[in-house]
Image (cartoon, rainbow, N blue to C red):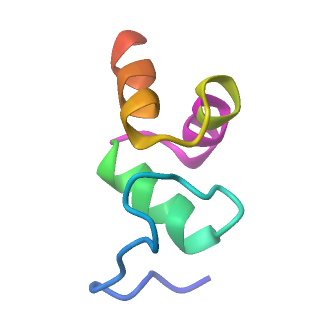
Amino acid sequence: MPDRPPHFKPLDPGRIDIIDREELAYWSKELHCTEPELAQAVTQVGEHVTAVREHLASRK
Protein backbone atom coordinates (compact mmCIF):
# COMPACT_ATOMS: atom_id res chain seq x y z
CA MET A 1 0.00 0.00 0.00
CA PRO A 2 1.48 3.38 -0.91
CA ASP A 3 2.05 5.99 1.76
CA ARG A 4 -1.03 8.00 2.62
CA PRO A 5 -1.34 11.46 1.09
CA PRO A 6 0.34 14.12 3.24
CA HIS A 7 -2.99 15.90 3.64
CA PHE A 8 -4.82 12.86 5.07
CA LYS A 9 -6.97 13.58 8.12
CA PRO A 10 -9.30 11.07 9.80
CA LEU A 11 -13.03 11.58 9.32
CA ASP A 12 -13.56 11.75 13.09
CA PRO A 13 -10.46 13.15 14.80
CA GLY A 14 -11.67 11.91 18.19
CA ARG A 15 -11.90 8.24 17.23
CA ILE A 16 -9.55 5.67 15.76
CA ASP A 17 -10.91 3.34 13.07
CA ILE A 18 -8.44 0.45 12.96
CA ILE A 19 -10.34 -1.13 10.06
CA ASP A 20 -9.33 1.77 7.80
CA ARG A 21 -5.70 1.18 6.75
CA GLU A 22 -5.06 4.90 6.18
CA GLU A 23 -6.35 5.77 9.63
CA LEU A 24 -4.33 2.97 11.20
CA ALA A 25 -1.17 4.31 9.55
CA TYR A 26 -2.05 7.92 10.44
CA TRP A 27 -2.73 7.25 14.11
CA SER A 28 0.30 4.97 14.46
CA LYS A 29 2.49 7.81 13.30
CA GLU A 30 0.66 10.41 15.43
CA LEU A 31 0.87 8.28 18.57
CA HIS A 32 4.42 7.01 17.93
CA CYS A 33 3.57 3.32 18.04
CA THR A 34 3.36 0.39 15.67
CA GLU A 35 0.14 -0.58 13.95
CA PRO A 36 -0.16 -3.80 16.01
CA GLU A 37 0.40 -1.81 19.24
CA LEU A 38 -2.31 0.63 18.20
CA ALA A 39 -4.76 -2.12 17.28
CA GLN A 40 -4.16 -3.82 20.64
CA ALA A 41 -4.66 -0.54 22.52
CA VAL A 42 -7.94 0.13 20.70
CA THR A 43 -9.09 -3.39 21.50
CA GLN A 44 -8.26 -2.88 25.18
CA VAL A 45 -9.52 0.66 25.85
CA GLY A 46 -11.81 1.52 22.94
CA GLU A 47 -11.55 3.81 19.95
CA HIS A 48 -11.39 7.21 21.68
CA VAL A 49 -8.07 8.92 20.93
CA THR A 50 -7.65 10.26 24.47
CA ALA A 51 -8.06 6.82 26.05
CA VAL A 52 -5.70 5.22 23.54
CA ARG A 53 -3.10 7.98 24.01
CA GLU A 54 -3.24 7.55 27.82
CA HIS A 55 -3.03 3.77 27.55
CA LEU A 56 0.01 3.91 25.29
CA ALA A 57 1.71 6.50 27.51
CA SER A 58 1.18 4.36 30.61
CA ARG A 59 3.13 1.51 29.03
CA LYS A 60 6.29 3.55 28.54
Q: Quadrant of residue 9?
A: bottom left
Screen quadrant of the C terminus:
top left
The chief SS type of the magenta part is helix
Residue 13: where, in percent of width, then height?
A: 37, 61
Place of residue 14 in the rendered image (x, y in percent of width and height, measured from the top left): 40, 52
At x 66%, y 23%, the residue is 44
Q: Residue at x 49, y 52 (%)?
A: 15
Q: Which image quarter holds the N terminus?
A: bottom right
Q: Position of residue 18 (x, y in %)?
A: 64, 55
Instruction: Tell me: residue 47, above or below residue 24.
Output: above
User: For residue 38: magenta?
Assistant: yes
Q: Position of residue 24 (x, y in %)?
A: 55, 59
The residue located at (57%, 42%) in the rendering is 47
Q: Is residue 43 magenta?
A: no
Looking at the image, residue 54 lies above or below residue 27? above
In the image, is residue 56 above or below residue 46?
A: above
Residue at 65 percent across and 69 percent down: it is: 20
Q: How many marks?
A: 0
Q: Which residues fall within the magenta stretch? A: 32-41
**Which picture quadrant has residue 27?**
bottom left
Q: Is residue 25 left or right of residue 21?
A: left
48 or 7, which is in the foreground? 48
Displayed quadrant of residue 39: top right
